[in-house]
Amino acid sequence: MNRTIKWQFIVSFVSISFIIIGAFSVMTLSLMDNHFAKYVAERQESELLEYTTNLERFYAENDGWPTTAAFDSIGLESLHNSVILKIYDTEKNLLWSPASSDMMGHNQKMLGNSSNMDNMMGSIENTPIEETIPLFNDEQKIGEVLINYMGPAVYSEHDALFIADMKNNLILAAIIALVLSFFFAALVAKKISRPIVKVKNFTRKIAKGNYSSSSPEKTAIKEIDELIVSVNDLSIQLENQQAIRNQLSSDIAHEIRTPLTTLKGNLEAMIDGIWEVTDERLHSCYDEVNRITRLIGSIDTINEIESQQDSLNKTSFDLYLLVENITANFEAFFAKKNIHYSLDGHSLFITADKDKISQVITNLLSNAVKFTPSKGSITLKVSKEKNHALLIVTDTGEGIHPKEINHIFERFYMSDLSRNSSLGGQGIGLAIVKSIIKAHKGTITAESDYGKGSTFTVILPTTK
């Protein structure tokens, strides 16, 4: 099931918080149990030592073992700490035990408290331990004490309550932390998802063709701001493309309408008898038909190149020699406009469709000759850079306006409609060039110093 980015963020954040808090709680409880058990064991060992010390001091203070009732204070204290003492003299005679005094009630109470502590401690396991410790008075053995206690350590009621409170507090802290993490995640998710939702709504407007709508405001998050900028750039590009498509439709209509209008007018005049049918007028009609045919043929050429990029007839040939042969066909045009032409480079073999590359060179040279004034110059350079072949055509024509240089490779785009019309242009040549270069996995770029000339750079791979 798909979730919104807000809920995805909340679920992820809370899940991570749950894992971290759970692991921290388990680790804390484990460390607390281990350290507290060690503390209780050390305390119990200290208490056992204190019992034997007290009995030895008790003997010394009384110059011998007193009556049985005199041991009740020490026995009561030991029973309170869940320890049972049995005191013997050197002859193994029993001097004192809980059964020999009126302390059975305390013993039952101790067992009851032990049961309550077992309920509070849960998994704490204890086993009865019996230990006999000798008693001395100035290095003279005076008897021994038999100690019975629960091991490895017995928690007192206070200890058990402390551990239980710590566990409850940890659970409460974990619950509070999870609740706070949920609200924090919701707050952050809302802050992140809100601009993304705005971007989503903005892209929907773009998809409906509403390119003029204002873009979302920038946020404090770098990635979202970059997304907003990218979407805004996309909107501008789509708006420009829409304008180009509208201009394209208008240009195609203009290119087809002009010869059709001329053709229709001539035919109507001849049909109505206004004009006499002559070879010259028929030839004029034929030229207009050819003009339409060339236009449609150019469009078909672009479509064919773009749809059949993988079916190029690639062979290995010398690019420099090909350029040299093609430029020989332009010598008459150079001479007619008194254009100075120079070819720079050396032999360079590439693997490509020779006919298509010939069309590229021809179109670029034709374009340069068309827009280079009399006594201008055209330079063509062939060179190699790493694994790429470079074909650079430079002219001293009028150049291309900076606002138009990014559109010159579009179909039917003409920077100056009146000038191109007078020169017989249709805005197809550079579009064909770009399609051929793209089919060869290459690139073509244009640079221009407006009013001084232009440079077209073709980059082609030298191998397949």
Image (cartoon, helix red, strand yellow):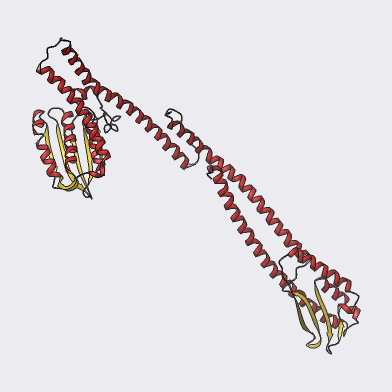
Vertical relation: 388 (above or below) 331: below
Image coords of residue 354 (percent x, y)? 17, 43
Farthest bottom residue?
91
Image coords of residue 135 (percent x, y)? 79, 84
Horizontally, residue 201 falls left or right of residue 463, namely right
The residue that appears at 69% across and 53% down in the rendered structure is 172
Horizontally, residue 306 falls left or right of residue 80, namely left
Number of marks in the rendered image: 0
Horizontally, residue 81 falls left or right of residue 355, namely right
Task: Report if residue 113 is visible in the image.
Answer: yes
The residue that appears at 62% across and 44% down in the rendered structure is 183
The residue that appears at 67% across and 53% down in the rendered structure is 173
Vertical relation: 18 (above or below) 362: below
Image coords of residue 247 (percent x, y)? 31, 25
Q: Quadrant of residue 400?
A: top left
Image coords of residue 104 (percent x, y)? 88, 74
Task: Report if residue 423 is visible in the image.
Answer: no
Report the front residue among 185 and 1: 1
Vertical relation: 27 (above or below) 86: above
Horizontally, residue 90 falls left or right of residue 243, namely right
